[in-house]
Amino acid sequence: MIEVSEILSKVRARLNDRNIDNCMFSDSVLIDSLNQAILNLTLEFRLNRQLVRQVLDAENPFLKIHNLLGIESAKFDTKELKERTNIMKDDGALELLILGDKLSVTPFKDGELEVVYFSYNDVNNILESVSMPRVCLEALVYSVLINILEIPTNEGNHYLIANYRQFLKLAKNNLANYLNAMYSKNIHFSKVVRV
């Protein structure tokens, strides 16, 4: 978990925006930019994976997931659903039915739906936390900086944006290495001998 206040503090430090009485950017503008950064990182790296199970029946035909971004796998009564659609049908092989934030199977029948999905929770104020690994901190900071500096306030912003894009690339590489170390099965480390 990363505190929103910590992210915004690092952003303001890099912008030299520490004058509390006369800030260049309001907290709400920074939080909007942070939400965009959270969304982008979650989509790019498929973060915040969660597993949910629900029994579907006539009274409860849908599984509802708030801020659904993607589905990694879906099973119905322990059998994997290979096909996905957004059109209801009356016959044929079972498929995962996706209607926005609502999931079901088509053609509908009673049973247990199990879904591994990823989503994001946006933040609304500086007292909240971002549910991402700590290694995402720098990537979030540089993403916010790039988004904020795209607002035309200064001619020199283009150079800053280019520099921050390089830092963002390094931060994303660190995040990719972290995720590979955590979740990859085939990790080979080379030994380096220093003389």
Image (cartoon, rainbow, N blue to C red):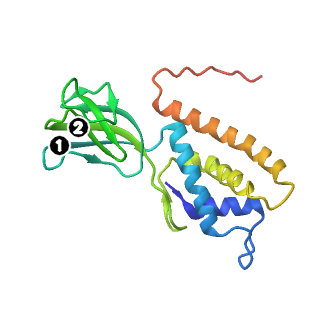
Relative image position of residue 161 (x, y in whole percent):
77, 48
In this image, 26 relative to 130: left or right?
A: right
Which residue matches tag 2? 113
Relative image position of residue 53 (x, y in whole percent):
24, 42
Q: Residue at x 33, y 49 (%)?
A: 65
Q: Quadrant of residue 121?
A: bottom left
Label 1 crowd (10 A; few <14 / some 14-19 / many >=20): some
Q: Is residue 29 above or below residue 120?
A: below
In this image, 73 relative to 134: left or right?
A: left
Does dot 2 land on a helix, a strand or a loop? strand
C-alpha distance separating marks 1 and 2: 6 Å
Q: Residue at x 69, y 43 (%)?
A: 168
Callout 1, which amino acid? Val
Q: Quadrant of residue 189?
A: top right
Does dot 1 land on a helix, a strand or a loop? strand
Classify the position of the C terminus by image quarter. Answer: top right
Relative image position of residue 88 (x, y in whole percent):
26, 36
Q: Which mark is residue 55?
A: 1
Relative image position of residue 103 (x, y in whole percent):
29, 42
Q: Which mark is residue 24?
A: none
In this image, 75 relative to 138: left or right?
A: left
Label 2 crowd (10 A; few <14 / some 14-19 / many >=20): many
Q: Is residue 14 above or below residue 79?
A: below
Q: Residue at x 72, y 72 (%)?
A: 23
The reply to whether callout 1 and callout 2 are in contact (CB within 8 Å) is: yes
Callout 2, which amino acid? Leu
Q: Number of numbered discs present?
A: 2
